[in-house]
Image (cartoon, rainbow, N blue to C red):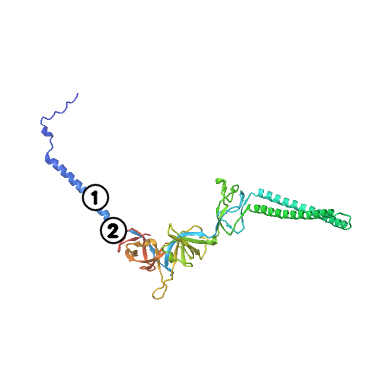
């Protein structure tokens, strides 16, 4: 049995919401939102307070006593370059038949590095020797003929003196002797020419053997067995123009470009302190060898060449190097040598002047310092620090004097 729908109210005013009830609901929601916002503000304030109360972590370094030395007048950077470096090529065009070295190999002067196909050159040498031998055999035959002609000449002279021979016969005998002597001279000259051709052919054979021009280290291997090599560029990409590149390691030096505005501070034989980029803690003594008397108008620099006073196997061609041109050795007022303090360059900050932050217990102390260049990766501090001082190496950029910090282990 189906149920009947509820009766429709006769009075529509019964569906109306009372104004007091409506205002009460809005006020309750507002208080709820305000309480939530206050709770968020309280949580954020607590977080900020905790973060501020926490001491920042810093990484520290200990200032080291520097070795007394000459002050740096000028710093520059450059590269290690060899004074003797040769790309070895053949004097003739040929196919490589042997390679007897590898990169990094030490070679001595005259050592065989490679060989070329010398079959054609040897054939030419054999031909020249055969031509010389034939000419020498001809000389032997002509000498026999000359001996016989001289006998006939003497006989003819005797007969002509006795009236048994005519003067014409005597002239003919004399001509025969002179002609044979001329032919022998020509043959001997031809032998000399053949000897010259033999030496030329032998030189072509020797040119098929590639030798090291000086003692050094092979830094590049440019050809393989089976490839064609030539002293000139020919045949496109199928012909090599070099066999190997050899560097004389005893001729390594430093080449730097110095700004022309400071070149007056550089003089020959001036002491230099060099630091390789690969070994920043290793100082190498050096001196200025020469200042190239020409400037680069594009870069406004002058090239300076510096000689190592101590060579080491760790020094390799084309390594990056930083150099400091040194001046006179400093002296303190009491006559003692001026000692510097070394700290990592990252510990020095720029706050209008050079400063460092010292760590005293768990507090920071801001300290102004005076620098005198760099040594490797360290800054040279001549005033403001003492050996053994603990300075901040890494930390937040907003450190301040008297701030509490935690040292990172």
Image quadrant in which you'd find residue 192: bottom right
View extreme (top): residue: 1
SS for dot 2 = helix
Q: How many marks?
A: 2
Please tell me how crowded label 2 is: few (under 14), some (14-19), or many (20+) other residues with Cα within 10 Å: few
Question: Is 293 or 315 nearer to us in this picture?
Answer: 293
Q: Is 53 placed left or right of 156 in the picture? A: left
Q: Distance between the residues labelled 2 and 1?
A: 20 Å
Image point 20% across, 48% down: which residue? 35
Is 69 rendered above or below residue 157? below
Quadrant in which residue 336 is drawn: bottom left
* Left or right position of 390 against 224: left
**Horizontal arrangement in the rendering, residue 398 relative to residue 144 (left or right):** left
Q: Nearer the viewer, residue 403 or 238?
A: 238
* Disc 1 residue crowd, few under 14, some 14–19, many 20+, Cα 10 Å: few
Q: Which of marks 2 and 1 is nearer the N terminus?
A: 1
Residue 128 x, y percent position in the rendering: 70, 51
**Above or below for 267 versus 117:** below
Image coordinates for residue 202, horizontal then vertical, percent: 67, 53
Rendered-image quadrant of the N terminus? top left
Is residue 375 something that shows in the picture?
A: no
93 and 244: which is toward the camera: 93
CB of mark 2 within 8 Å of CB of mark 1? no
| Left or right of residue 20: residue 389 | right
Q: Which residue lies furthest to the bottom in this view?
A: 334
Image mark for residue 40: 1
Residue 167 visible in rendering: yes
Looking at the rendered structure, the secondary structure element under dot 1 is helix
Question: Which disc number belongs to residue 275?
Answer: none
In this figure, which residue is indicated by the disc labeled 2?
53
Q: Position of residue 173 (x, y in %)?
A: 83, 54
Residue 409: percent from the left, percent from the top?
Answer: 38, 60
């Amino acid at each position: 049995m189906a149920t009947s729908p509820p009766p429709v109210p006769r009075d529509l005013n019964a569906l109306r919401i009372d104004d007091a009830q409506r205002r009460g609901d809005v006020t309750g929601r507002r208080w709820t939102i305000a309480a939530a916002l206050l709770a968020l503000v309280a949580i954020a304030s607590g977080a900020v307070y905790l973060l501020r109360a926490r001491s920042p972590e810093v990484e520290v370094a200990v200032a080291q006593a520097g070795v007394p030395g000459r002050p740096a007048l000028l710093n520059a950077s450059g590269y290690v370059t060899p004074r003797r470096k040769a790309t070895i090529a053949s004097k003739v065009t040929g196919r490589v038949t042997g390679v007897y070295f590898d990169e990094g190999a030490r070679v001595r002067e005259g050592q065989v590095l490679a060989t070329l196909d010398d079959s054609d050159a040897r054939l030419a040498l054999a031909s020249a020797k055969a031509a010389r031998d034939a000419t020498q055999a001809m000389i032997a035959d002509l000498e026999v003929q000359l001996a016989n002609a001289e006998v006939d000449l003497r006989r003819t002279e005797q007969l002509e003196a006795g009236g048994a021979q005519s003067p014409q016969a005597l002239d003919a005998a004399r001509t025969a002797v002179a002609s044979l002597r001329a032919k022998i001279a020509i043959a001997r000259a031809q032998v000399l020419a053949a000897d010259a051709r033999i030496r030329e052919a032998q030189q072509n054979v020797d040119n098929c053997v590639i030798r090291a021009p000086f003692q050094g280290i092979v830094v590049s291997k440019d050809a393989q067995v089976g490839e064609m090599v030539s002293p000139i560029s020919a045949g496109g990409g199928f012909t090599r123009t070099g066999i190997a590149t050899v560097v004389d390691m005893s001729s390594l030096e430093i080449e730097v470009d110095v700004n022309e505005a400071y070149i007056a501070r550089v003089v020959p034989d001036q002491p230099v302190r060099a630091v390789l980029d690969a070994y920043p803690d290793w100082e190498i003594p050096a001196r200025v060898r020469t200042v190239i008397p020409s400037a680069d108008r594009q870069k406004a620099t002058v090239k300076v060449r510096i000689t190592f006073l101590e060579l080491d196997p760790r020094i390799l061609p084309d390594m990056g190097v930083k150099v400091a041109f040194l001046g006179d050795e400093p002296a303190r007022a009491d006559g003692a040598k001026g000692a510097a303090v070394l700290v990592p360059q990252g510990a020095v900050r720029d706050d209008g002047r050079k400063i460092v932050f010292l760590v005293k217990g768990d507090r920071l102390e801001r300290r102004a310092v005076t620098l005198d260049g760099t040594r490797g990766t360290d800054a040279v501090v001549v005033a403001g620090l003492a050996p053994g001082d603990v300075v901040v190496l890494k930390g937040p950029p907003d450190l301040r004097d008297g701030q509490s910090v935690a040292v990172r282990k």
